[in-house]
Image (cartoon, coloured by chain):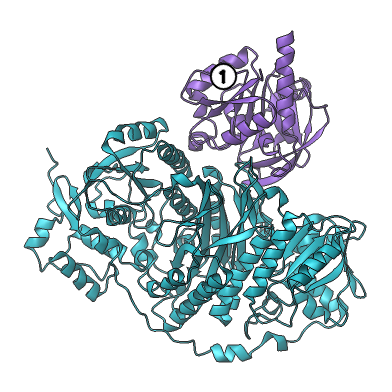
Chain colours: A purple, B cyan
C-alpha cells in the first residue's frame, strides 16, 4: 500500500489540487484534509499548500494557525510525522511556531514570479533525503511576502544545525542569507517558499525536481516502517 | 413588526398619489423621451427605486442602446457550428471541445474605473469577468489582460500602469488563476482613457451548463457572497456612460468598487459544489448594476415574475435606502434560483465555506418584478422592460473628414535608414521602444503556473492550457488589437486584429474555433466614432464569417474620450483554439543548432501604421497592410498539420516591428544565435520592418525541410528559407550586412519598462 499524504484545504488555499497531483505523480496517495476538521484520517504525512488562507487576514498564515486541523498537525509533527509547508503553507508553519523565523514583504515590494534556482543544502530531512546535498533544483518562486527573516542568533543556529534546507542561487526577494527553506530540529517539518508541486512535469514546469520531495518522504516513511 | 419607515421612502403608493413630483431623471443620465416611456410602461411615475433601476438598465453600458443595431450582424453572419452551446446574450459564450468538455470564455472592459482608481478598477475588472464564467457553470482556469496606456514617459502613466498591473495581478493571484498572456501598448491617445480589457476562460463538463432563468413558481431567490455596501453606486450610469470632462475635476472616486478575491475564491468553490450537486435551477452574477441587473435579467429570462424582500439583503453600511441596495455594485455576489426543498442544503454548503447565503425572495407567476422594503412595495415593474426592452438608437454615422487626407499621407514615403549601420541601430532602437520591449516587468507580477496546466504562457504568441490530463486535450487563447491600424481603416484594422489573434493561436498548432471581442471606442454621440464602430463591427462579423468561426460574445466600451478627443478605435479580439494534444504545441524559440529558419508568407512594402513609423517619425497615416483571410486559413491549417506531425521545432508570428522584432524575440527567448541571409534582391529595410500580415517565422528540424516546403507549396503558401539556428553564433548574424550580439539585443530589449517608470 502506498503512503497516504494529507493535503489541507483552508479557505483560500490555491495549490491544494496541484499538491495532490504532485503527490500522485510521485507515487503516493493524496488525501484531502479540511481546515475545520481536527481529524487527519490516518495519513502518513501532511502537505500545507500555497494560497491565501483566510484571505491573508491580519498576516499571511496568521489565522490558519488557529484552525482545527493545525492542532492535530502540530501534535503529529511533535511525534515525528513528516510535514511540509509550501509558500503560504511555509507561512502557516512559521506562524504556528513549528518553524522559526517569519516571511515578510519582498524587499522590492512587489509580487514576483520567476523560476528560482535553489541549492538543496541538506539531505538530512524527511523531504530531501533523496537528494544529494548540494544538488541544484529549479522551482517556480511566486509570492509577494517571501522574504525570510529571523534574528541573527536564530540564523546562526539554523546554519550550525544544518537546518537551512534550500538556498536561493539568485535571491529573488531579499531573504536573509539567501534562505528559501528551513526545517525543524528533528528534520521532519520543512517549509519553503518556491513551489515543488509546480515542477513535476516537463510539459508544465521549469523542471521535474519537485518529484524529489515526494521520493524523499516515501523513502523516509518506508525506512521508518522497516525499522 | 416592521421598522418605522422613514417618510422619505418612495413607494408605489406614494408614486400613485404624487404623479407630478419632479424627478431627477436627467441627473441619472436619462433623456426626456426615455423618462416619458418609463411613465408609459408603468402607467404612473416611477418610484425612486424604479427610476434608479431604469436609469441603470437603460444606460449605454447595460442596454447597448447605441451598439445594438450594429451588433446584430454577429448573430446574422455567425457561422452555424455544432460546437456553439451558448452564444451572444448569455454571460459568456460556451463552446464544445469534445463530447464531454466545454469551454466558456469572454473578454470585458473595465476602462473608466481603471483610470479613476487603477488598482481596484483593474482588480474588479478581473473579478467581474471571472463571475461571468462561473455563471455559465464553468470552473475559471485562466485569465489574460489586454492593456493600453498613454505615453510611457507621461507622469500619469507612472500612476496608472503600476496600479493596473498590481490590480490585475493581485486579484488573479489571490483567486488562484494563472495569467497566460495578453498585450500591453502605449499611445498618447489613451492618456486620459487607458484600456483595461480582461479575459477569463473556464472549463466544464457539458452537462453542467447553467441557465440564468428564474423559473419554477415558488423557487427561492438566494443572494450568495459578500455583503452589500455603498461601493460602486452610480458606477454604471455615471462612470461608464459619461465622458470625462476636460477640467479633470470630476470626483468619481466613491463610484469605483473594491474587490475581495478571497471571497471570489470561495464563490467559485461554493458555486461549483452546488452545480455538481444539482442544487441550482438558475444563476446570475452581480456585476455592473448589481441586484438591479441580476433580478431583472433572471426574472425576464424566466417564465413568471419575482418577489423580493429587500430588507433581507445583508448590508455592510448603515442607512442604505432601497435604491442604494438595488444599485450597489459591491463585488463577489451571485444570485441563485433554488428549489425550496434544496434551499436548506444550499445555505448549509455555503456556510461550510464561510460564505454568506440569504434567501431574499421567490419566483412568482405574476409576470412582475416586485420589490418590497419592510413590507412596502418600492418596485413593481415588468422585468423585460428593464432587461430587454430598453431604448435602441440609430445614431448618426459619418466618415471622419480627415480620413482621405490621412490615407494619402503614407509612411512608405518617409525617410528610411539606408546604411547597414543605420539599419542595425534601428533594430536596437525598435527593440527598446515601449511597445516592442520586453514586458516581463508586468508579466512577472502574475502567477502563471497555479493549477499546473499552463503549457505556454507569456511571452508566447498564445497561452496554452491543458484541459484533461488523460487525453492531453487543451486550448490556446490569444488577445490582440491594433488601434493604429483601426484608426487608418476601422474595417480592415479590426480584421487585422482578428487575423493576428487567429494566427497567434494557429502558431501554437491549435485550430481556432471561436471569438470574443471587446470593442473600445469614443463617444457614440459623435457620428465619426459611430462610423468607426459600424465599420469595425462589420469587419469583425465579415471576417469571422469568412474564417468560419463564430463570435460567441463580448463587450462594448464607449465614451473612451476626454473632451472631443477620442481614443483610436480599438477592437480587441480574443480567439480560442483547440489542441488535441498539448504535448504537440509549437513553442517560441529557435529550436536547436542546425535547424532551418524560414519565413512563411509574403513581405510587401507595408509600413503605414507600423511601429517603425511611430517610433522613428511619430507618424500615423496611409493605409494599413492588406488582409487576406483565405491565406490565414491555409496558414492555420498548415500549422495545425505540422504541429500534429511534429515537423516544426518553433514558430513565431510576425506583427508589430516586423521580421526584425520577431528575430530579436526568438533570439532573446532561446538564448541561441541565428545566421540569416535575406533573399536575393530584397531591400533589407523593407524586409526587416514591413508589417505585412499573414507571416510566420518557422524553425524546421533537420531532415524536415523538404516535407515542410512541400506542405507549403501544396497549399500555395510562399515559404522562404532565411538561415539556420546556431548556438555558436552570438546573437544575430545578418550575412553581408552586420552582427548584433545577444548582449546588445538584451541590453536594448530588457528592463525598459522598469527604467521608464523610474524603478
Drawn side of residue B320 relative to residue A65, left or right: left
- In the rendered structure, the answer to whether residue B310 lies left or right of residue A177 reads left
Give percent across and percent down for residue A221. 70, 16
Q: Which residue is mark 1?
A: A73
User: Where is residue B351, by image quadrant?
Assistant: top left
The quadrant the N terminus of chain B occupies is top left
Q: Relative to residue A155, is residue B651 depicted above or below? A: below
Q: Nearer the viewer, residue B182 or B147?
A: B182
How many marks the image carries: the answer is 1
Q: Quadrant of residue B683?
A: bottom right
Whole-percent x, y for residue B737 in the image:
90, 75
Q: Residues within 10 Å of mark 1 (few under 14, many from 20)?
A: many
Q: Residue at x 61, y 63 (%)?
A: B184
Kindly identify the residue that appears in the image at 29 percent across and 41 percent down.
B314
Residue pictured at 44% horizontal, 86% vertical: B398
Q: Please identify the quarter of the rendering in which residue A174 is found.
A: top right
Q: Quick check: can you spot residue B190?
A: no
Measured from the top left, where is residue A79 in percent x and y?
A: 62, 11
Q: Chain of mark 1?
A: A
Q: Is residue B20 left or right of residue B619?
A: left
Would you say residue B325 is visible in this rendering?
A: yes
The local secondary structure at tag 1 comes to helix
Locate the C terminus of chain B and report the quarter of the image it occupies: bottom right
Amino acid at each position: 500500500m502506498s503512503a497516504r499524504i494529507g493535503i489541507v484545504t483552508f479557505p483560500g488555499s490555491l495549490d491544494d489540487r496541484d499538491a495532490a497531483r504532485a503527490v500522485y505523480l510521485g507515487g503516493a496517495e493524496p488525501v484531502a484534509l479540511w481546515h475545520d476538521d481536527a481529524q487527519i484520517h490516518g495519513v502518513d504525512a501532511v502537505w500545507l499548500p500555497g494560497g491565501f488562507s483566510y484571505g491573508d487576514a491580519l498576516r499571511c498564515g496568521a489565522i490558519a494557525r488557529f484552525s482545527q486541523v493545525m492542532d492535530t498537525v502540530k501534535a503529529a509533527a511533535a511525534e515525528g510525522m513528516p510535514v511540509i509547508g509550501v509558500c503560504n503553507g511555509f507561512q502557516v508553519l512559521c506562524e504556528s511556531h513549528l518553524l522559526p523565523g517569519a516571511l515578510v514583504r519582498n524587499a522590492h515590494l512587489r509580487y514576483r514570479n520567476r523560476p528560482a534556482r535553489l541549492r538543496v543544502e541538506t539531505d538530512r530531512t524527511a523531504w530531501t533525503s533523496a537528494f544529494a546535498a548540494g544538488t541544484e533544483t529549479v522551482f517556480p518562486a511566486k509570492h509577494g511576502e517571501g522574504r525570510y527573516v529571523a534574528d541573527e542568533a536564530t540564523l546562526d543556529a539554523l546554519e550550525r544545525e544544518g537546518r537551512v534546507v534550500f538556498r536561493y542561487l539568485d535571491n529573488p526577494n531579499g531573504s536573509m542569507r539567501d534562505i528559501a527553506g528551513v526545517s525543524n530540529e528533528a528534520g521532519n517539518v520543512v517549509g519553503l517558499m518556491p513551489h515543488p508541486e509546480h515542477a513535476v512535469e516537463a510539459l508544465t514546469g521549469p523542471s521535474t525536481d519537485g518529484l524529489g520531495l515526494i521520493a524523499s518522504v516515501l523513502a523516509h516513511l518506508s525506512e521508518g516502517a522497516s525499522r | 413588526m416592521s421598522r418605522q419607515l422613514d417618510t422619505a421612502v418612495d413607494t408605489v403608493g406614494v408614486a400613485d398619489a404624487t404623479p407630478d413630483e419632479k424627478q431627477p431623471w436627467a441627473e441619472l443620465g436619462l433623456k426626456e423621451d426615455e423618462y416619458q416611456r418609463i411613465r408609459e410602461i408603468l402607467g404612473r411615475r416611477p418610484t425612486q427605486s424604479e427610476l434608479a433601476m431604469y436609469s441603470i438598465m437603460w444606460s449605454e453600458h447595460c442596454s447597448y442602446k447605441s451598439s445594438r443595431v450594429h451588433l446584430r450582424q454577429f448573430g446574422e453572419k455567425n457561422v452555424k457550428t455544432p460546437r456553439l452551446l451558448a452564444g451572444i446574450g448569455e454571460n459568456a459564450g460556451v463552446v464544445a471541445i469534445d463530447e464531454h468538455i466545454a469551454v466558456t470564455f469572454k473578454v470585458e472592459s473595465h476602462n473608466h474605473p481603471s483610470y479613476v482608481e487603477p488598482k481596484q478598477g483593474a482588480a474588479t475588472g478581473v473579478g467581474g469577468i471571472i463571475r461571468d464564467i462561473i455563471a455559465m457553470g464553468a470552473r475559471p482556469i485562466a485569465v489574460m489582460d489586454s492593456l493600453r496606456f498613454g505615453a510611457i514617459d507621461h507622469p500619469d502613466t507612472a500612476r496608472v500602469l503600476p496600479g493596473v498591473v498590481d490590480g490585475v495581478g493581485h486579484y488573479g493571484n489571490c483567486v488562484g488563476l494563472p495569467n497566460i498572456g495578453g498585450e500591453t501598448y502605449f499611445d498618447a491617445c489613451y492618456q486620459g482613457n487607458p484600456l483595461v480589457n480582461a479575459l477569463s476562460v473556464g472549463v466544464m463538463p457539458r452537462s453542467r451548463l447553467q441557465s440564468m432563468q428564474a423559473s419554477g413558481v415558488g423557487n427561492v431567490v438566494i443572494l450568495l457572497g459578500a455583503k452589500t455596501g455603498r461601493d460602486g453606486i452610480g458606477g454604471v450610469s455615471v462612470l461608464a456612460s459619461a465622458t470625462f470632462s476636460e477640467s479633470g475635476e470630476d470626483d468619481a472616486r466613491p463610484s469605483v468598487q473594491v474587490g475581495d478575491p478571497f471571497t471570489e475564491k470561495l464563490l467559485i468553490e461554493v458555486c461549483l459544489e452546488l452545480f455538481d450537486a444539482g442544487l441550482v435551477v438558475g444563476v446570475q452574477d452581480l456585476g455592473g448594476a448589481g441586484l438591479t441587473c441580476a433580478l431583472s435579467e433572471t426574472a425576464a429570462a424566466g417564465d413568471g415574475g419575482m418577489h423580493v424582500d429587500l430588507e433581507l439583503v445583508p448590508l455592510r453600511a448603515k442607512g442604505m435606502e432601497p435604491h442604494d441596495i438595488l444599485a450597489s455594485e459591491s463585488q463577489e455576489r451571485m444570485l441563485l434560483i433554488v428549489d425550496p426543498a434544496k434551499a436548506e442544503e444550499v445555505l448549509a454548503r455555503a456556510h461550510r465555506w464561510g460564505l454568506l447565503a440569504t434567501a431574499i425572495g421567490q419566483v412568482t407567476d405574476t409576470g412582475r418584478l416586485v420589490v418590497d422594503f419592510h413590507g412596502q412595495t418600492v418596485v413593481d415593474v415588468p422585468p423585460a422592460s428593464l432587461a430587454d426592452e430598453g431604448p435602441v438608437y440609430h445614431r448618426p454615422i459619418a466618415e471622419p473628414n480627415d480620413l482621405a487626407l490621412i490615407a494619402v499621407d503614407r509612411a512608405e514615403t518617409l525617410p528610411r535608414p539606408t546604411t547597414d549601420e543605420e539599419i542595425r541601430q534601428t533594430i536596437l532602437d525598435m527593440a527598446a521602444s515601449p511597445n516592442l520591449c520586453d514586458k516581463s516587468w508586468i508579466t512577472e507580477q502574475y502567477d502563471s503556473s497555479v493549477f499546473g496546466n499552463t503549457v505556454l504562457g507569456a511571452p508566447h504568441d498564445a497561452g496554452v492550457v491543458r484541459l484533461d490530463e488523460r487525453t492531453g486535450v487543451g486550448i490556446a487563447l490569444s488577445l490582440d488589437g491594433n488601434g493604429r491600424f483601426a484608426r487608418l481603416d476601422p474595417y480592415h484594422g479590426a480584421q487585422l486584429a482578428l487575423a493576428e489573434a487567429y494566427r497567434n493561436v494557429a502558431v501554437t498548432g491549435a485550430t481556432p474555433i471561436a471569438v470574443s471581442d471587446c470593442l473600445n471606442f469614443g463617444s457614440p454621440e459623435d457620428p465619426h466614432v459611430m462610423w468607426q464602430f459600424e465599420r469595425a463591427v462589420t469587419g469583425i462579423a465579415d471576417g469571422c464569417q469568412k474564417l468560419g468561426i463564430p463570435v460567441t460574445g463580448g463587450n462594448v466600451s464607449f465614451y473612451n474620450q476626454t473632451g472631443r478627443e477620442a481614443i483610436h478605435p480599438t477592437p480587441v479580439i480574443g480567439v480560442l483554439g483547440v489542441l488535441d494534444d498539448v504535448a504537440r504545441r509549437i513553442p517560441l524559440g529557435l529550436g536547436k543548432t542546425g535547424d532551418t529558419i524560414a519565413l512563411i508568407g509574403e513581405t510587401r512594402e507595408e509600413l503605414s501604421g507600423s511601429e517603425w513609423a511611430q517610433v522613428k517619425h511619430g507618424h500615423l497615416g496611409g493605409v494599413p497592410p492588406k488582409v487576406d483571410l483565405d491565406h490565414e486559413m491555409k496558414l492555420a491549417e498548415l500549422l495545425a498539420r505540422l504541429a500534429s506531425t511534429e515537423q516544426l521545432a518553433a514558430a513565431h508570428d510576425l506583427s508589430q516591428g516586423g521580421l526584425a522584432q520577431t528575430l530579436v524575440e526568438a533570439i532573446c527567448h532561446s538564448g541561441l544565435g541565428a545566421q540569416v541571409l535575406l533573399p536575393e534582391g530584397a531591400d533589407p529595410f523593407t524586409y526587416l520592418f514591413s508589417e505585412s500580415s499573414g507571416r510566420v517565422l518557422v524553425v524546421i528540424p533537420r531532415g524536415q525541410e523538404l516535407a515542410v516546403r512541400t506542405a507549403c507549396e501544396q497549399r500555395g503558401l510562399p515559404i522562404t528559407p532565411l538561415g539556420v539556428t546556431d548556438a555558436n553564433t552570438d546573437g544575430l548574424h545578418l550575412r553581408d550586412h552586420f552582427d548584433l550580439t545577444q548582449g546588445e539585443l538584451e541590453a536594448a530589449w530588457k528592463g525598459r519598462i522598469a527604467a521608464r517608470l523610474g524603478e
